Amino acid sequence: MIELVLTVCLLASPDACREERTESATPSLVSCMMQGQFYAVRWSEEHPAYRVSRWRCEPAGARI
């Protein structure tokens, strides 16, 4: 399984960034890449105090 990893930063403090992993994993890298932007937009709508600075897809459970 592949999961989406978002790097998010506080709007009030742009240097305060962290990684968020989404709950929904996809079966392939291609499907994650195709759906990633939509998940990132949805996450940012649900968390208005943050902005998504980047996103990536990686194997579920992997830590870089």
Image: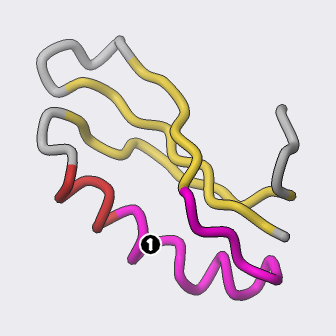
Picture mark count: 1
* 54 falls in the magenta region: no
Q: Residue at x 80, y 57 (%)?
A: 58
Q: Quadrant of the N terminus?
A: bottom right
Kind of element beneath mark 1? helix
Figure colour scheme: secondary structure
Residue 44's spot in the image, x, y percent?
25, 53
Q: Quadrant of the C terminus?
A: top right
Tell whether 6 sits left or right of 57: left
Tell whether 12 sits left or right of 17: left
Farthest residue in the front direction? 23
* 36 falls in the magenta region: yes
Observer-nearest of 24 and 5: 24
Residue denoted by label 1: 37
Q: Is residue 43 above or below residue 38?
A: above
Q: Residue at x 76, y 86 (%)?
A: 30
- Magenta stretch? 23-40
Say which quarter of the image contains residue 42.
bottom left
Q: Is residue 3 above or below residue 61?
A: below
